[in-house]
Amino acid sequence: MTEQRKRVLSGMRSTGKLHLGNFVGALDNWVRMQDQYDCFFFVADWHALTTDYADTSQVKRNSMDVSLDWLAAGLDPDRSTLFIQSHVPQHAELHLLFSMITPLGWLERVPSYKEQRENITEKDLGTYGFLGYPVLQAADILIYKGDLVPVGEDQVPHVELTREIARRFNQFYSLTSPTSAVVFPEPQPLLTPAAKLPGTDGRKMSKSYGNTILLTDPEPVVRQKLKTMMTDPARVRRTDRGNPDVCPVGDLHKIFSDRETNARVDSGCRTAGIGCIECKKWAADSLMRILDPIQARRKKYEENPRLAWDILESGSEKAKKVAAQTMAEVRDAMGMSLAFEAPDRAGGAK
Ligand code: TRP
Ligand code: SF4
């Protein structure tokens, strides 16, 4: 039965404690996929190094924080394989081999590469590793022969590139096995329906903007952040009518509040029947309904972090088995297996 389930694979860079944007943009979706698919989820700590190579003191801590948030949000080691990328060294081996066959032009054309080289000026991203970011991602995906890769829109070009690398590898090297001649299937991106989640300043919620609400924020912090959250700028006084469709708090309600609350917000705001303070209080109530069970579950692991670590380690062991099997096929297809072969006496004159 498990054999027939499609394999889902995705990763998240180890950026530290996750925020609501990570939750609605990825994590919540992953949690729901667990019953339907054979899921592999990993913390991409090597990918974090592509930009944060100069100071690695927080990498491990950050991986741990991401892992705790995953378990807290409901990723379940009984149904999914959860692990840390750098604990499965086969990713690096496959990355090396892919780097041999990937034309530079493919990498220089990747939109996120161009964008980040232009926008991130405080770090030197003129490194080999940064250019190779999508090659490592291709190795992450293909080493598990992932069928589906749930990602946000910005990551689709990386999955496209993964397909091109798979095709090129299959063209150069093929297995002699009668059952399947190609080593790598081509994965499909599975676009996460992107709810527009604004941060406290109204811009997209993002760690780099400092406008996040963390999954770990205690209730008073959540309420305080909402109190200072931006609202419909046209609604200056209590008596002004507002429009929840142009208000970041209105957006939060649409994502996290039930129908009734949304109806009360909509009419109350448009008629100036409610004040923003009240409206924000309701938004905080809705957020806490989501965050309370997550925080309760996280507490269990915080009290016993060893438990979380062991889960990730046994996930790594499971992942390593699959990865090693793929690497054996890769070596085979490339004519570089570890098996003994007698030297060719004809000296290559075939
Ligand atoms: N690049 C992805 C991101 O920034 C993270 C990632 C690394 C990933 N390896 C992956 C996502 C493999 C999907 C599949 O979000
Ligand atoms: Fe925004 Fe609510 Fe104020 Fe309307 S009442 S402007 S939706 S915070």
Image (cartoon, rainbow, N blue to C red):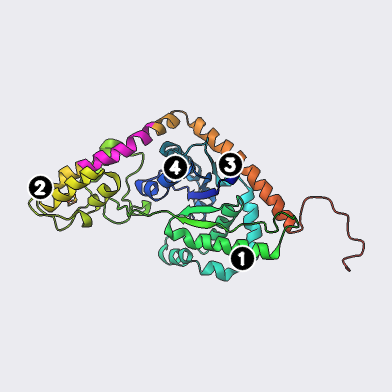
Of callouts 1 and 2, which one flags the residue occurring earlier in the amino acid sequence? 1
Mark 4 sits on what residue? 31
Q: Residues within 10 Å of mark 2 (few under 14, many from 20)?
A: some
Look at the numbered discs 3 and 4 and tell me whether their residues touch, using CB distance below 8 Å: no
Instruction: Examine the rendering and report whether any part of residue 214 can be seen.
Output: yes
Of callouts 2 and 3, which one flags the residue occurring earlier in the amino acid sequence? 3
Front-most of 63 and 252?
A: 252
| Residue plotted at (45% across, 40% down) | 70
Mark 2 sits on what residue? 273
Q: Residues within 10 Å of mark 1 (few under 14, many from 20)?
A: some
Mark 1 sits on what residue? 102
Residue 194 at x, y percent in the picture: 37, 55
Disc nearest the viewer among 1 and 2: 2
Assign the N terminus to one quadrant of the image.
top right
Q: Alpha-carbon distance for marks 2 and 3?
A: 54 Å
Assign the C terminus to one quadrant of the image.
bottom right
Q: Alpha-carbon distance for marks 1 and 2?
A: 61 Å
Residue 263 at x, y percent in the picture: 19, 47
